[in-house]
Amino acid sequence: MSVLAYGVAAWIFCVGIYGAIISRNLIHLAVCLSVAQSSTYILLLAIGYRNHATAPIFKGFENRTKAVDPVVQALTLTDIVVSVTVIALILALALDAHEAANTVDPDELVGMRG
Amino acid sequence: MRRQRARGLLALPALGGLGALLAWGFSGLSPFGHFHGFYGQLLNAIALPQRHTTNTVAAVTFDYRGIDTLGEEFILFTAVIGVVLLLRKAGRATPRDVAQDVVSSQASRYFGVIGAGLVLLVGLWLAAFGYVTPGGGFQGGVVIASGIAVVFLACGYRAWLRVSNEEVLDPLEGTGAGGFVALGLAALIAGAPFLHNLFGPGKAGTLFSGGSIAIANWAVALEVAAANLVLYAEFLEQYVMTLVRDTGDE
């Protein structure tokens, strides 16, 4: 049980990287990237978890209640929102590449045209 | 196919290195459920007495690590600028282009608009009480944007054009990003460090708590909501333009 969360994070990361390596479609590549990135959320939250602790929100709780780490949670929440916009940027680039070369296969995006 | 296999072989040494690095990194982690990071525990203990903020995550995001959030906010801002630069060059879709907007039934329009209002309300609540109960500007902003996106789903593209006016959204996004910086600069002008919490801590557990955290929270909510709406608008426009092009070909 104790290694499950870390194992899931590592597994999701590897699945994302594997997908990125074999990808033959820029949109698929962007999805693989976001899968690989999702592993960081699980890893961060798993690291900050403490047994029998509450969320680090003390409305209606004693401040002395044992709580999980708030820093990794703050990192995760900004990470999620920022990743969405960055994926949007990558998809816009894919659209642009499709317009220029009429393909979304990275292997066919070779050579330059003036 | 051959190229793909070559790529797989090329990746093998790098993957081996990555695997070793992962194993080394994971072996150094503290066992699950037994994290004793001093920084987080310290913040859990002092955020409420110092800032009267009951949501420690919000206190970390908007105060103790405010400069980090400022950076994150500008990643978001820059990414949206990039999308706009890439997608806006291809001419605009006007209401005339979408003359044959998909007409949805009266019932789905009514329920859609009610649903949009409800989601919007949840988003505003998440943002407003972000530093008191679970929530915050980032989450609230995303939900607010989703609520407005429901208008497109329920009422079609023409209604969407009316609620996603870029001449309103672009300045709002800039205001959100600039507001955070202005808050930091205001602290400098007052003779304190950048992003120092300027205002009194207020009463814990109410909206009047946390001092500057409330302002930073709303700046981020505005920025995130406007940024997401700009993204939706740009990609929806691309989609509608392909429809226009397709019907033009026939």
Image (spheres, coloured by chain):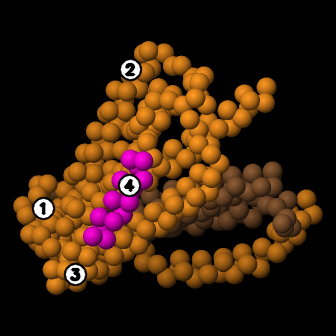
Chain colours: A brown, B orange
Decide whether the magenta segment is chiefly helix, strand or loop. Answer: helix
Q: Nearer the viewer, mark 4 or mark 2?
A: 4
- For label 3, the residue is B188
**Which of pointers 4 and 3 indicates the residue nearer the eye?**
4
Depth check, front residue: B87 or B110: B87
Q: Is mark 2 on a helix, strand or loop?
A: helix
Q: Which of marks 1 and 2 is in front?
A: 2
Which residue is nearer to you in this view: A94 or B174? B174
- Alpha carbon distance from label 1 to label 4: 28 Å
Mark 1 chain: B
Q: Which of marks 1 and 2 is nearer the N terminus?
A: 2
- Please say whether residue B174 is one of the residues in the magenta stretch: yes
* Figure quadrant of the C terminus of chain B: top right
Identify which residue is drawn at 60% across, 22% down: B100
Distance between the alpha carbons at the discs numbered 3 and 2 = 50 Å
What residue sits right under mark 4 in the picture?
Answer: B171
Label whose residue precedes the other's in the sequence (4 or 3): 4
Circle 3/circle 1 CB separation < 8 Å: no
Is B68 left, or right, of A112 in this rendering? left
Q: Which chain carries label 2?
A: B
Q: What type is the residue that disc 2 sits on?
A: Tyr
Residue under numbered circle 1: B209
Residue A63 visible somewhere in the drawing: no
Which one is in front in this view, the residue at disc 3 or the one at disc 2? 3
Q: How crowded is mark 4: few (under 14 residues within 10 Å), some or many (20 or more)?
A: few
> Is residue B67 rendered to the left or right of residue B3?
left
Specify the farthest residue to the right. Answer: B2
**Which residue is under mark 2?**
B110
Q: Real-space Cα distance between discs 3 and 1?
A: 22 Å
Q: Is residue A63 magenta?
A: no
